[in-house]
């Protein structure tokens, strides 16, 4: 394998010479960070497309084949155009609030208005991800920990997903209750009850539209989140499981990073959860020596869904070909494969 001492990255970085129009300047006065201006444009696109199309499906004069055309448009845009960018915008804005103090009420718009259209119950994502997952770092007390599972096994993944899907909210509420974090506990319970209460009410208008607009996205969203978390934490050093470099992975130079705000940089995200999404490539470049010393797994040209798929097929050769050999930390492809197999084993 060819040693890599200088890694050329094409993932998004800060625009050094931005040009703003009057519309941009209006929003720049209201957001915390000018680098997050793309979030405003994405929010507006979703608000003017996904929301109206979703509402159309509840209207009584949309019936028959027309209803199915609208439903297909909604499903396509929801899952193949906006789901990834929205989910990771919600992720970034949970770590770093989008709107400034004077306009803080607008920070409720994503989790309470748009999130339900993508199967995210209000405020539960932020509570789970920030207050639980980052605190526990995929260790034993992490409710979404992958440690105890054989991470190249589809059967293990299905058990993992089933446990998450059916127990995550009660478990999360209990987690916060045990730690006397009453506000977080109540936020989780409130978000889940409001979502499903609204769905029950909307079923009296149209159960088909309710399933299509809210419940099917909920199922698909939780599948995608668990696939992503599984891949992000598939390779764990049993002797040092709390080491960010050895329990997470990074994916670089993939179109996914352009579409989803550098989400592939999961190692640096755990090291610095509040690091702005445009700064992750720089963090990787300046810390390559640490990555090499820990034999951190950096994949090039693929993203988490690829990693999950290759693992489910135990296709370690394809995975190994995508590993960046930072500072020559591996002497051969077989060494990479052996390390990945070892780090994919279940940890008791």
Image: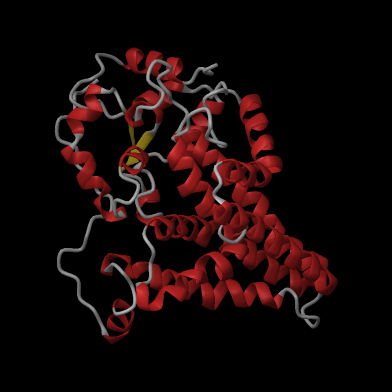
Circle count: 0
**Residue at position x 19%, y 37% from top?**
7
Q: Is residue 12 visible to the viewer in this orientation of the structure?
A: yes
Image coordinates of residue 129 in percent, x first then y, are 49, 47
Q: Is 43 or 331 nearer to us in this picture?
A: 43
Image quadrant occupied by the C terminus: top right
Q: Is residue 328 above or below residue 10?
A: above
* Residue 288 versus residue 77 in the image, above or below: above
From the viewer's side, name the closer residue of 253 and 248: 248
Q: Is residue 168 above or below residue 146?
A: below
Percent x, y of residue 168: 64, 43
Q: Which residue is pictured at 52% across the width and 18% down the height?
A: 347
Res 203 quadrant in image: bottom right
Q: Is residue 242 left or right of residue 29?
A: right
Residue lying at the far front of the rendered structure: 180
Please state which of residues 164 and 184 is positioned toward the viewer in this rendering. Answer: 184
337 sits left or right of 231 in the view: left
- Residue 297 location (% of width, % of height): 34, 28
323 lies above or below 212: above
Q: Residue at x 27, y 69 (%)?
A: 34
Residue 123 placement, left or right of 332 = right
* Drawn side of residue 294 relative to residue 194, left or right: left
Q: Residue 9, can we see it?
A: no
- Residue at 41% over, 20% down: 340
The quadrant of the image that shows the N terminus is top left
* Colour convention of the picture: secondary structure
Q: In the rendering, at what x and y percent does residue 295 appear?
A: 29, 22
């Amino acid at each position: 394998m060819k040693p890599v001492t200088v890694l050329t990255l094409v993932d998004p970085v800060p625009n050094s010479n931005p040009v703003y129009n009057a519309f941009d300047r209006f929003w720049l006065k209201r957001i915390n960070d000018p680098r997050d201006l793309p979030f405003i444009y994405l929010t507006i696109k979703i608000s003017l497309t996904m929301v109206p199309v979703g509402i159309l499906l509840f209207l009584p004069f949309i019936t028959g084949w027309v209803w199915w055309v609208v439903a297909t448009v909604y499903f396509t845009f929801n899952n193949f155009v906006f789901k990834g960018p929205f989910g990771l915008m919600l992720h970034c804005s949970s770590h770093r609030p989008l709107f400034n103090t004077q306009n803080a009420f607008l920070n409720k718009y994503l989790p309470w208005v748009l999130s339900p259209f993508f199967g995210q119950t209000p405020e539960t994502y932020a509570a789970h991800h920030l207050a639980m997952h980052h605190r526990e770092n995929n260790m034993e007390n992490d409710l979404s920990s992958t440690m105890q599972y054989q991470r190249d096994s589809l059967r293990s993944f299905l058990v993992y997903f089933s446990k998450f899907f059916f127990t995550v909210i009660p478990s999360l509420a209990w987690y916060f209750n045990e730690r006397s974090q009453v506000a977080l506990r109540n936020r989780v319970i409130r978000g889940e009850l409001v979502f499903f209460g609204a769905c029950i009410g909307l079923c009296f208008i149209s159960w088909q539209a309710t399933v299509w607009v809210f419940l099917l996205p909920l199922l698909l969203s939780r599948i995608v989140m668990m696939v992503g978390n599984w891949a992000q934490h598939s390779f764990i050093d049993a002797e040092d499981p709390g080491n960010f470099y050895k329990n997470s992975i990074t994916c670089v130079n993939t179109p996914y990073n352009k579409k989803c705000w550098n989400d592939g940089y999961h190692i640096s995200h755990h090291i610095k959860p509040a690091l702005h999404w445009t700064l992750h490539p720089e963090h990787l470049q300046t810390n390559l020596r640490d990555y090499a010393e820990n034999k951190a797994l950096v994949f090039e040209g693929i993203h988490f869904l690829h990693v999950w798929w290759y693992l489910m097929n135990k296709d370690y050769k394809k995975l190994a070909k995508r590993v960046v050999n930072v500072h020559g930390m591996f002497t051969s492809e077989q060494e990479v494969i052996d390390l990945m197999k070892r780090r994919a084993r279940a940890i008791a």
